[in-house]
Image: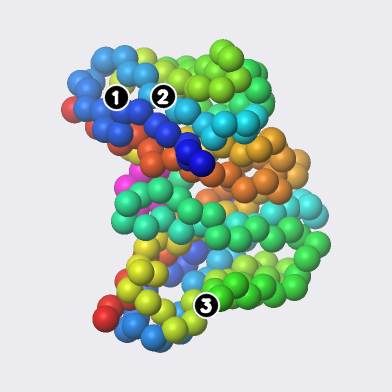
Amino acid sequence: AQKVTQAQTEISVVEKEDVTLDCVYETRDTTYYLFWYKQPPSGELVFLIRRNSFDEQNEISGRYSWNFQKSTSSFNFTITASQVVDSAVYFCALSEAKYGNKLVFGAGTILRVKS
Amino acid sequence: GAGVSQTPSNKVTEKGKYVELRCDPISGHTALYWYRQSLGQGPEFLIYFQGTGAADDSGLPNDRFFAVRPEGSVSTLKIQRTERGDSAVYLCASSLIAANYNEQFFGPGTRLTVL
């Protein structure tokens, strides 16, 4: 069965702190994709990154970085030097090849960045 | 370019009534997805279309829910005999093709309230 767990319900940090959002997934498929989406207060989900199961290279994009470890079934997201504009709900999602194209989302982590 | 649009943005209805929610995908996107997001939860998959046909409707909760995409572009999600438990934000997304490595672009959602 597909499952995505985001154990951190809410995180509060002060601006310029680094913060890591955890994501653990369960799958029996060998081919799958992992995603992170951001949902700001406006409500519209914004795509951040996609990773396939065969590529464990970490990725950095500006202040954002992602750590994918198949050994622990985790796909964690780190924001360096957080800013108030990073405040949002962040969702990790899984798509398995054999279950078609639907995304299975975690419950999300609310990130509050205070100035 | 224009993103995914959804109308109405808000819909309030009474228990037992029929509602239609509309989604206009990004031009040229052949795949269209419907999700439902309850308060404090991640989006849950309902149905997706490749072209005009429903490729996977396994997430529709019961036969009161139905969706169409007659011309392969705009889609309508239809809910009959609404119940209070149907209250949620209904999200639509589209992608270039129906492949699980494609990122899905989300609309702003329709907030449905059933009184």
Name the residue tied to disc 3: A63
Callout 3: chain: A
Name the foreground residue: A73 vs A110: A110
Q: Is residue A71 visible?
A: no
The residues tagged by marks 1 and 2 sit, at their Cα atoms, a distance apart of 19 Å
Kindly indicate the quadrant of the structure image that contains residue A66: bottom right
Q: Which mark is residue B22?
A: 2
Magenta stretch, residue numbers: B36-42
The residues tagged by marks 1 and 3 sit, at their Cα atoms, a distance apart of 44 Å
- Mark nearest the camera among 1 and 2 is 2
Query: Disc 2 on helix, strand or loop?
Result: strand
Q: Which percent across, then down, holds residue B110? A: 34, 34
Mark 2 crowdedness (10 Å alpha carbons): few <14, some 14-19, many ≥20: many
Q: Which percent across, then down, holds residue A7? A: 47, 67
What's the amino acid at mark 3? Arg
Above or below residue B9? Residue B64 is above
What's the amino acid at mark 2? Arg
Q: Which percent across, then down, holds residue A51? A: 69, 60
Query: Disc 1 on helix, strand or loop?
Result: loop
Q: Are marks 3 and 2 in contact (CB under 8 Å)?
A: no
Kindly indicate the quadrant of the structure image that contains residue A98: top right
x 74%, y 58%: residue: A52
Q: Is residue A52 left or right of residue B83?
A: right
Mark 1 crowdedness (10 Å alpha carbons): few <14, some 14-19, many ≥20: some
What's the amino acid at mark 1? Glu
Q: Is residue A76 visible?
A: yes
